[in-house]
Amino acid sequence: MSAEGPAVRPERPGDVWGRMRRHDVLRHAYAGAARHLIGLVVPGLLVFLPLGLIAVSALVVIVDVDGSAAVVNGAFELVGSPGTPVLVWSAVVSAATVAAQMVVLPATVVLAAGRLAGEYVPVSAAMRAALRRWPAMLALVLVGAVVLAADTAAGLGLLLWNGAQVTAYGVMVFLLLFSLPCLLAVPGVVLKGRSARSALALAYRLTSDAPWATALTLAFGVVIFPGLAQQAVNVATSGTPILRIGLGWALALVAVPFQATVIARLFLHRLAVAGMTIEFKAVVGGLPAGTPRRVRPVPVLAALLLPTLLYGAAALVNPLGWLEVSEAAVTKNVDLSEPQALYLGQDGRMVMLMDGSREAKLLTCADTGCARPRLTWAEPAAVGGEPTAVSARLADGRLAVATWAVEGRYPWVYDENWRSRLRLRICDAANCAPAPGGKPLAEMTWRDRKRVVALAARPGGGLVAAQLHGIPEDSDADEEALSLTICDDPACAHPRVKEVAKVPANGPRALVADVDPDDRPVMLHLDQDSGAVHVVSCDDLACARARVEQPVEGDASAYLFGGRDRPQAVMVVRADGRPLIAYQDMADGTIKLLDCRDRACSRAASAALTAPGDRHAGPAMALDRAGRALVAFRDLDRDRIVIAACAETRCTRTPVTAITRGGGLGLAMAVDGRGRPVLAWLDFGDADDWDLVVTTPLNLSARAIPGESAVWTAPSAPGRGRR
């Protein structure tokens, strides 16, 4: 690379002395750096370009082995918390970067001093001068690290002592400003050949008569203006990650010549103002000399653009086949609520049912990426304390949503007249309306407020509502009734209700309902204390005979004494009528997939999708076009969301997105019109710091992660059955 800078004509020492005495150092320094930028940026390119290529190549090898990287919105990102190899890589690269800067900055200072003095200094000579003074520069870096740590500790200590943030930060800024003249020790080391201690003493002696002017010049020229420029680039290119990263790389290299020129000119200026003629002449006369060479900007510009071109090509082509993800935060104009369900609605729109501590609502996305979300419907106010809404996708893409609402009196006044009714709404892409002529699906009083409802769509267009009735407070029974409400049309104008089974009722429980292609209901009952799973299957729509099986035993001690969260379970019914169940095993905390061998799930094989002892939450499940089970869950130990794609009990796991705040609330999944899984989840820090996120893996079906296959368990024993 030949870009030694423009040919310069030597100036007389008196001319240089006069120019360096001029004030407005920052303006003159930046102007000089801009004029000679091509030549001044060469040391950074010679050192950081190969270092960056080596570091990126090593990182690619590391993350490709454990599958912890993805192309998210066109930018490469790590998925979840970095593992030990990535942390080691980060430490090595950080140390190498500091070591490289200990050569690049002093070499650029030598070049800048030559340009300011009107002398030509070859890049090779400047690099050799910097390398010879590397031990002294190492001492300066160590002193700077100690000073920075002391300044920060003083400010934080004051903050912890009296809690006054303004005072603490003011003290910290004052100390940092007082420490900035240390930067003038760099030219003292590399231009005058002093030791680190002697160079520091000279730096503070030069600035003793103008400490604040010197500190502010260094603060703005070396720290503030380059930082503002970097921030401006990030904001201006926020929607184009390739451009943002490319310009960020180029700006980081271009900033060094401006910083070095400010340091060099301020050092020469302070020498001239202090009248240190001998030292000034020694610095100018001691600059390495060389034969001027014509500037060649093309190689320099090509080197600046090379990382951007390589990164852009890699992101667009994705030669290693990394997971590609589209992700959007859709928090704007949405109140804090948990995603309860996600569906492919009419015209390919994704529709999300949200509920939680506030009123239920439907959020409709214009496309899979949810770039333009719209609030379709919100539940009437003052019903937030009722059980969460339930929903089902009808055959034509509309949604049936059932919500509880108290009618008549104020909902928080509980007495013997209190009533809450479960009513249906039919929702399309535009709005939601009460089901025409529909009757309430259920009604509960204050004494039986423990009801749980699940909704499922029938293949022919009707609905099935399953309901757990709970046990009255004055009863000592240990089982509760499970009933079905069968509707021949979505409005449920003529519901038929039948009690179909008795299931254990030991505490909190969850209920899932589905209908197989032959119009036969299947229900899943989960005991959220013990984790026990019961499957209730009907032989026909009327459920003249119901069969109850328990494919998963419970372990109440894990919740009561093991500190585990309450488990969750989901179920989908395949085209042949056999259920697939994903649940959290209370015995060891693993997320498991249960592959039922028959409709009643009397026999099943299970696969553990996570390792025992790890913390997980979820799951959510959907079937892709090939009939594979896609099981999503939150890996809380590694701060990521993982999707396991399973054909029967043969699975591969793929981390798909990182959890930045905690992500402990809400996870729903559906398959879009192109067969891709779409996740809706809440990245939750606290009530004032959260995001509703929509994540779409774009090429999940084409990927397999080496070493990420699930841990298999033997087929489970036949479940305990009751008829």
Image (cartoon, rainbow, N blue to C red):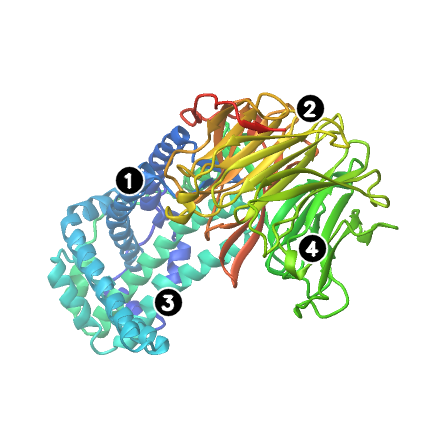
CA gap between label 3 and label 4 equals: 50 Å
Q: As drawn, is 65 to the left or to the right of 421? A: left
Which circle's residue, 2 or 3, is located before the other in the chain?
Answer: 3
How many numbered marks does the figure carry?
A: 4
Look at label 3 and name its amino acid. Phe
Q: Counting residues from the N terminus, which is met first, the one under dot 3 or under dot 4?
A: 3
Residue 356's place in the image compared with 595, above or below, is: below
Which of pointers 1 and 3 indicates the residue nearer the eye?
1
At label 1, the amino acid type is: Val
2 or 1: mark nearer the eye = 2
Mark 2 and mark 3: Cα distance apart in space: 67 Å
Under circle 1, the secondary element is helix
Check the image and report above or below for 230 versus 100.
below
Q: Position of residue 5 (x, y in %)?
A: 36, 47
Q: Residue at x 78, y 42 (%)?
A: 398
Label 4, on which residue?
361
Answer left or right for 229 relative to 269: right
In x, y percent, where is residue 457? 75, 37
For mark 2, what is the residue? 575
Q: Nearer the viewer, residue 426 or 480?
A: 480
Label 3 sits on a secondary structure element that is helix
